[in-house]
Amino acid sequence: MSTPASPTVVVEDLVVCFGELQALAGVSFEVGAGEVFGLLGPNGAGKTTTIRVLTTLLEPTSGRASVAGFDVRRDGLWVRASIGYVPQAISVDGALSARENLDFYARVTGVPARERRERIEQVIDEMNLSSMLDRLARTLSGGMLRRLEIATALLNRPAVLFLDEPTVGLDPSARLMVWERLRDLREQAGTTIVFTTHIMEEVERYAERLAIMDLGSLVEQGSPAQVRARHGCPSLEEVFTTVTGHAIDDGHEGRLADVRAQRSVARRLG
Amino acid sequence: MSAPSAASRAASAERPRALAGGPLARVAAGTVAMAQAEMRKLRHDHIDIFTRSVQPLLWLFVFGTALSKSHAFPIGHLEYRAYLAPGVLAQAAMFIAIFFGLAVIWERDVGQLQRLLATPLPRVAIVLGKAAGACVRALVQALLLLAVLAAFGIGVRWSLLGVLGMLLMLMLGTAGFACMSMLLAAAVKERERFMGIGQLIMMPLFFASSALYPLSIMPPWLHVLARVNPLTYEVQGLRQLLDGSGAGAELWLDFLVVAAFLAVMLAAATRRYPKAIL
């Protein structure tokens, strides 16, 4: 199994329990500096839980995780200062304009006052937002909204950008736009990107390495080509079925709350 | 928070620059940013402030006018509407505060809160920032209501110090009730219950206070409730500042109680609220 030379994210035997329920059952992986890393799996696989531990929102039950060289448990503050995070739920304020949202996040992520303007201009450029700056965020299309959210997460120049289902609810052309901007960002700024998705094609096209998660465990990892070759499968879809014994959209309907959350994200993005 | 351990610092190329300021600077920056965001929202859409001002005006001009004819309450020489005005001001601000805190469960704020929790912003700044947002709205509404009081010549003894003191009292109370509602939002996780619970606490707080009538006419059990109700002290403070009737010591006590209420609610909400939304 390939491991990156200089890991920016290190996860070792991570366990997270919610009461009786074991959401993560000993997950280990590493993400190299400047890598685009995809966590692939159905709803309830533990992708979001993993991201929440890495962004310090959730205390792990046991195991170790570090981001940008800082331990998530001991040095949480330093982790938070080193990352950008876009959760699945809408995180920009619909009643503020795009520019006001950028200004807000610049203030709360500790961007020094004298650099604020310059940083905002930079992320506007990086995420191609110049045409929508004075529009209220609630009037933006789903793709624009996601790009705005990603821009707000770049203001503090994070070492690692965490994106939880960045393209959920987006149509294919909007999804492509988001990924083009992310690819440029990675090429120009060398930002490490960790994202979750349940869309095979997205991992195949954009992730340099991936981890397949199912029922709280990490069942396979490597580059898309490596993973396919290892199982002699022509597509990741077949790899997924081989390693988990079921299809990605099989039997994981999710609770009412999940379905409602997803639909409402899709509706608000749509 | 302490400095990162030597091992992990060695692994990182440089200390993240986002931590340039100390924790207090971060609390201040976050609170100001959230209050400013609320101000900007009001500038984009001020209809809300006007629609919310209808209810306090109804209390004042319908309820207040009707009761001023009946002389039902022993309030001395005061006209009833002048007696009622501080109660209505405090109640309107409390409504804003409580619904502002509860608003988080209408999923509008969930993503933003998750984001804020993953920034270097201290948790107390998130709660204080939300409370400051409620204060901004309450402040704008209070100025509107004060303008109405002035326009209708309702017996207020105007002085600059009185108005400033009143606004300060109103801010302390509003922040306290906003924190209280965040605490409540953290305790009750089911979205559907919040409106009901909001009503369930607001009306008793309002009726078991000196907002509508003096404590002296209350039956003993209600009197006890009113005595432990922070809204009572907020209203008493406002009343003394508005009509100039107050003695110094009593006013200090009112401020002290409301400030202590805010401190306790802020501490409790900081412990419980931010994590409850995950």
Image: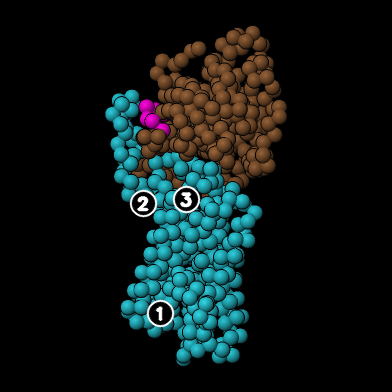
Residue at 41%, 60% (x, y): give it: B264
Q: What is the span of residues highlighted in magenta in the rendered image?
A: A67-72
- Work out whether mark 1 precedes mark 2 in sequence or the reverse, and give the earlier one: 2
| Colour displayed for chain A in the image of the structure | brown
Q: Which one is closest to the eye, mark 1 or mark 3? A: 3
Q: Which of B11 and A264 is in front in this view?
A: B11
- Amino acid type at circle 2 is Ala
Does any portion of residue A95 appear in the rendered image? no
Q: Position of residue A96 (x, y in %)?
A: 53, 49
Q: The cyan chain is which one?
A: B
Q: Nearer the viewer, residue A30 or A195?
A: A30
Q: Position of residue B83 (x, y in %)?
A: 49, 82
- Compared to A85, does B193 lie above or below? below
The chain holding disc 3 is B
- Work out whether mark 2 precedes mark 3 in sequence or the reverse, and give the earlier one: 2
- Compared to A157, does B204 lie above or below? below
